[in-house]
Image (cartoon, coloured by chain):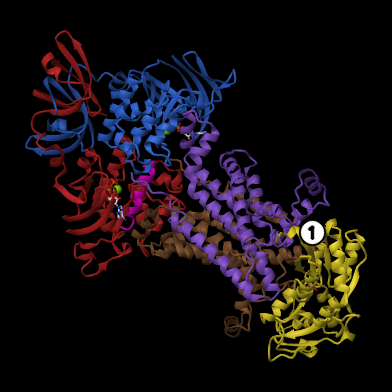
Chain colours: A purple, B brown, C blue, D red, E yellow
Amino acid sequence: MIDWNPLLITFKLALITTILLLLIAIPIAYWLANTRSRLKPVAETFVSMPLVLPPTVIGFYMLLALSPSNGFGNWLDEWLGLRLVFSFEGLVLGSIIYSLPFMVHPIQAGFANLSPSLKNASYVMGKSKLTTLIRVLLPNIKPSLITGIILAFAHTIGEFGVVLMIGGNLSGKTRVASIAIYDEVESLNYGAANTYSLILFGITFAILLMVYLINGGYFNKTEGHD
Amino acid sequence: MIDWNPLLITFKLALITTILLLLIAIPIAYWLANTRSRLKPVAETFVSMPLVLPPTVIGFYMLLALSPSNGFGNWLDEWLGLRLVFSFEGLVLGSIIYSLPFMVHPIQAGFANLSPSLKNASYVMGKSKLTTLIRVLLPNIKPSLITGIILAFAHTIGEFGVVLMIGGNLSGKTRVASIAIYDEVESLNYGAANTYSLILFGITFAILLMVYLINGGYFNKTEGHD
Amino acid sequence: MIDISLQKLLKSPGGRMNLNVQVKLEEGKLITVYGKSGAGKSTLLMLLAGLMDPEKGYVKVGDEIWTDTDKKIMLPPQKRKIGFVFQEYALFPNMTVRENLLFAQAKGQPGTIVDQLVEIIDLGQLQNRKPNTLSGGQKQRVALARALVRKPRLLLMDEPLSALDHEMRVKLQTYILKAHREFNLTTLLISHDVSEIIRLSDFMIELDQGLIIRQGDPVGMFTNDRVNAKFQFTGEIMSMVKQDFIVIVTVLIGRNLVKVIANDQEAAVLEIGDKVLIASKAFNPIIHKIS
Amino acid sequence: MIDISLQKLLKSPGGRMNLNVQVKLEEGKLITVYGKSGAGKSTLLMLLAGLMDPEKGYVKVGDEIWTDTDKKIMLPPQKRKIGFVFQEYALFPNMTVRENLLFAQAKGQPGTIVDQLVEIIDLGQLQNRKPNTLSGGQKQRVALARALVRKPRLLLMDEPLSALDHEMRVKLQTYILKAHREFNLTTLLISHDVSEIIRLSDFMIELDQGLIIRQGDPVGMFTNDRVNAKFQFTGEIMSMVKQDFIVIVTVLIGRNLVKVIANDQEAAVLEIGDKVLIASKAFNPIIHKIS
Amino acid sequence: GSKQDDKLTVAVAANLQFAIEELVEKFSDQTGVECEIIVGSSGKLTAQIFEGAPFDVFLSADLKYPEELFKNGFTFEEPVIYAYGNLILWTLKKEINPDLESLTAKEVKHIAIGNPKTAPYGVTALEVIKGLGIEESIRNKLVFGESVSQTNQFIISKAADLGFTSKSVVMSPRMQNRGFWKEIDKSLYRPIAQGMVILKARESFKTKSIQFRDFILSREGKEILHKFGYQIEF
Ligand SMILES: Nc1ncnc2c1ncn2[C@@H]1O[C@H](COP(=O)(O)OP(=O)(O)OP(=O)(O)O)[C@@H](O)[C@H]1O
Ligand SMILES: Nc1ncnc2c1ncn2[C@@H]1O[C@H](COP(=O)(O)OP(=O)(O)OP(=O)(O)O)[C@@H](O)[C@H]1O
Ligand code: MOO
Ligand SMILES: [Mg+2]
Ligand SMILES: [Mg+2]
């Protein structure tokens, strides 16, 4: 019998990370798409950095920053009761940092491609920026949101390096599928590794295929008729 | 003194991978953007899979498939003289698979957003599909190409899991920066890990920032004047 | 009275251009802004709507101050009572026609206004369709209706009809006039089309390089001294057929082809494509309505 | 002779539509394709260019067969000697104006043709600019020149002038005529504009719902029986001012405003916005060239 | 419940991963204490303990790492040696003899060893190679696994022709009769003394941790370790 826990944790992690990332990425992407600040390229670079840094580097610095033997980690631990190393919460934080660019980039592109007159039309109707964002802008960049969600979700499922560094491989808590497969391979249980891999492959293949089918292809815009 | 080899290998790997990926991804993206085949969503899903599969899974199956005592690995070894485990070439192959979606997706989007009349205009001038691709289509999706190149390059620099599985940690050959950092952390040499991380961070930050600055922002199209 | 004094530095293809507009507009009128591409027409409307900030100047609408750079007043677009019809319509693709109109409602505004507009602008059939499934003319009507939902004090329209064919255009001009009168609006319209301007507007401003170069009654501005008791037209020569000592010249006037007989001397200076003036010495026109 | 017989099933907003065009066109002529939006005009041009495949039919140009579904002949667009001017110009943004023209050259074609076209179409000043820095009219000229580089047998133009203002439009019509004559082309042009059609074309086809509903001489087709010795115009009523027993009716004809005096009875049936016919009983027109 | 929070967490060096299953099973049967096993290279586990990993007992592949932890105050007491490890050469290839001569043979292209930076068995393997004076000549053949586990994996996938690993691997039921192996002459390396410490990370588990340590050092524990090829002082 295989242990379903790592698969459950993986999908739980991917789900929570994706939801939180969506909430974090929308304001960042909105700002990046609209700012004329000269700091924009720098901000863009920072957002892209997690893409470039090996997950081990991210993991390493998170380990240093969050370890309770450290100032910040200690503060978190004592004041908020948050232990971010070797805990599920820590994996969520790591995954958010790790997948940030995958959520921000497509949404930023989506905002940038929207005609500014949509926003203006809403403003002259007396609608606040927030109302405009929620009721007008976001519903009209759905394909970009879907792209961001898929990328972030998928990327989190595939995460390995960060988890290896800060997760500590605790079953039921931080042993995600990628680590479990690694473990099984290391203990020479190729059968179990195979099973995990196939299940992971199957589920994610199904999810992706569904999205592509529903979406009628990633990049197809809804066609006008005029 | 730190060993510069891992950093050199990392950038060499990223460079070679990016160039090869560009050559591979362009035809795939071109086909995906133009096909009306009903297999398109399936093909898109396959291209996206490396995004979802943990690098350890990719690495594990590559290890099994490429080991010279295995049918395929043996064939490669005997007929092409290619040993893909424990070799730089193997890392290149692994990185190509691992970063494929990052190159294909933006280029596909670029092709899909080009007006079909550009292609048609070239055809009626008697230009072949290849000439049209090289002289008309590619130069006009430069921002998408740059996006793909950055993403693939960056993603390769950050690669860890695949290399861990099939690299064998050979200094001067397969010990890339991400592995070196992991090693240093494990041997409690935080100082060295720090140095590697900072250098990697610095160089990639500089590369990205330069690209963003030159490109005047990722997603800005060249503006018309009409 | 709408009292406007606005300055803004613009980047134009040929370097910098200073938009500098001083004008007082009477309320309740339909005013056209006319001018070459790049003259600053759209910018003027954006400044009035508060969608762009001027470097210097003010906008006073009745006793309200909308913009005043000296007093650092810059009412956000949300608080200006304006309707804006954008050139590309800017309908929200995610909402149906009716939802577009409902979205425009102010909080607490009675829902009857939407039904009323649907009635007036003839949108009954289209209510539940998404903008993407509408034709250009239909989109335009929806955009107009949507701009009227909040009963704006000032209606701004940026080349609303330029993309439409002649027939649709005439139809929508009627809707615009109807709305302008029914809702007692002050309307500013950007247009390039002479017949549209003459038909719709009470007053016209011509911009060039950011400055008002002419303003006044549109009929007067387009016709100069050409309109008088005499019948005279400008047109373009389409063909010339020589017959013995005369030449039959076909001239296109509007959509009408007219044949005029010219003698050899007269014809000698004419060429196909020339713009010509045709005038009559004695003329007794009759007017017939076309069903 | 260009012998066309083409059938293609199209998806139109209101369900399916069968494009079914049978026509023989004389070579060397300038032919306009006219018709409502969605009638199938662009599709016809795409079929002729080989950029779309018909379900059934043939295209024979002189003694060459370009398309023949029965014989399974489908010459690729590369091998048809056509020039195509796309509505959105389709200039290559990565190349300068000159590079756009040079790219169009066939292998081994002498380079002089580009210089010749630059001369004829007046592109000297623009040669080294990128398309993005050109105005609409300039882009249009480049697109036209580029389509002529290969000395096509058939020039296809899809609403090439619709986005331009009147002045620019007239200027480009001149270039089109010049090129058509100079290069001895057979030209197919899609246009909605009556004056353009009359001015440019020798022959006209009107499409509706995929079928040819009328074809013939454009002047005849637009003017019906309206052109005769008498001077008569259609126009639109702009205003009516009552004075004692008469009403002064201002009518817009083309860009001309004309005042006509109507008596009470005549005026009773008239309203602002009505289309009217104005005819003269006795008229002695004089024609003057406007400098 | 299966929650990790109420289980004794035992971190073990990779070479012990097969023996530990049986050890824990017996221990749980006797005491009713449920255990969670974390396997890794000794180096990685130590690094994680330094950063606050919630481990209760640590069984290392050497004494160096436990002593490091003890010195830095992460443990309740000094490390105790629970076993001595045995190094073997292992291959899955019929045509290769798992003896030291093969190391320099031409047909042997890759030799897997543990990464000396993180895996003590790697340190010992390197010691053997150096002792034979063949370090230079086979340097290009060596491939490094992060831990004994990864070394095994290189051997089993036959990506490496031959490799140094722990005897416990080939003694495990799963790997018995797989390939060919040979013990390395003990005179060629210092005994691999494997140390164990009780960690302070979770005070509430101290009693259970002591129970666990005592079990490992009991006759029963020693027998299991012996069965898996460790050298034990009874
Ligand atoms: N935000 C801006 N900042 C600076 N310059 C701008 C800005 N927006 C537009 N411009 C420039 O101001 C000039 C006037 O633009 P505007 O859109 O007002 O012209 P327009 O009269 O509406 O022309 P058209 O008829 O082509 O719409 C143009 O040269 C344009 O490039
Ligand atoms: N590849 C295609 N397959 C099926 N139907 C098509 C295809 N391309 C266009 N159509 C449909 O064929 C009809 C005719 O289109 P076409 O573009 O030829 O019209 P048109 O006469 O050029 O109109 P317009 O004046 O608006 O350009 C439209 O309803 C369109 O939706
Ligand atoms: O058991 Mo180890 O720590 O991989 O040598
Ligand atoms: Mg404008
Ligand atoms: Mg068309």
Say few, some or many: other residues with alpha carbon within 10 Å of mark 1 (under 14 / 14 to 19 / 20 or more).
many
Q: In this view, does B14 lie above or below E93?
A: above
Judged left or right of residue D176, residue B99 is right
Q: Which residue sits at x=64%, y=75%?
A: A190
Q: Which residue sits at x=48%, y=56%?
A: A211
Q: Is residue D158 above or below residue C118?
A: below
In the image, the segment drawn in magenta is D136-150
Magenta stretch: includes residue B36: no
Q: Which of B178 and A182 is in front in this view?
A: A182
Q: Nearer the viewer, residue C97 or B212?
A: C97
Residue E23: x and y, percent? Answer: 79, 74
Quadrant in which the C terminus of chain D is drawn? top left
Instruction: Determine which residue is flagged by label 1.
Output: E53
Q: Identify the image quadrant of residue A79.
A: top right
Q: Identify the image quadrant of residue E28.
A: bottom right
Judged left or right of residue D58, residue A140 is right
Helix, strand or loop at disc 1? loop
Q: Is residue E227 above or below residue D204?
A: below
Q: Which chain carries label 1?
A: E
Q: Which residue sits at x=45%, y=50%?
A: D93
Judged left or right of residue B121, residue E186 is right
